[in-house]
Amino acid sequence: MTITIRDATEADIPAIFEVRTSVRENHLSVAQMAELGITSETISQMLGEQPCIWVAVDGGRVIGFSVADAADACVFAAFVRPEWAGQGIGRRLMERAEAFLFDRHSSIWLHTDGTSRAAGFYERLGWERMPDVANRDARFEKHRPQTRS
């Protein structure tokens, strides 16, 4: 298994949607994403503005992705095909998104279902759960590591 993480390209957009619709937790259909304003066109626009989407690839097949929103200092999405879960791919995708955001911000955040497996995953990566988020949602924050002089 040789998994590579690279910047996404326009050609990866269909595969990104395939990964996103393959997940069991936090599943959304293409139609549901469109209702939220997440379409091939909006993903293409994001890619055109800056390299803020990364894909995990195995033998040419996209098996995961992460997306960061530089303007909002947040990790917008991170998903791995269910059959590839637990192999460190999500961690590598998050590292790429975090590095991108920490180049621009000292503090970053994300939202997820606070009862999901993803919530525990983010905690294991050093994200801090913030109090008082509505419903089942949880806000997580992370601060740029201090460098030694």
Image (cartoon, rainbow, N blue to C red):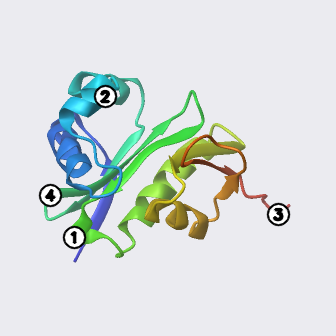
The N terminus lies in quadrant: bottom left
Confirm or deny contact between disc 3 and disc 1 (CB under 8 A). no
Front-most of residues 135 and 114: 135
Sequence-wise, the earlier of marks 4 and 2 is 2
Mark 3 → mark 1, Cα distance in angstroms: 40 Å
* Relative side of 149 to 32, left or right: right
Up/down of 27 relative to 117, above or below: above
Q: Secondary structure at mark 2?
A: loop
Residue in view at x 29 percent, y 24 percent: 35
Residue in view at x 51 percent, y 59 percent: 115
Tell me the residue that label 3 is attached to.
148
Mark 3 → mark 2, Cα distance in angstroms: 40 Å
Mark 4 → mark 2, Cα distance in angstroms: 22 Å
Tell me the residue that label 4 is attached to.
61
Q: Nearer the viewer, mark 4 or mark 2?
A: 2
Tell me the residue that label 2 is attached to.
38
The three-letter amino acid code for the residue at tag 1 is Glu
Residue 71 pos. (x, y %): 57, 27
Up/down of 44 relative to 109, above or below: above
Q: Residues within 10 Å of mark 3 (few under 14, many from 20)?
A: few
Q: Residues within 10 Å of mark 2 (few under 14, many from 20)?
A: some
Residue 132 pos. (x, y %): 71, 45
Sequence-wise, the earlier of marks 2 and 1 is 2
Residue 5, quarter of picture = bottom left
Tell me the residue that label 1 is attached to.
83
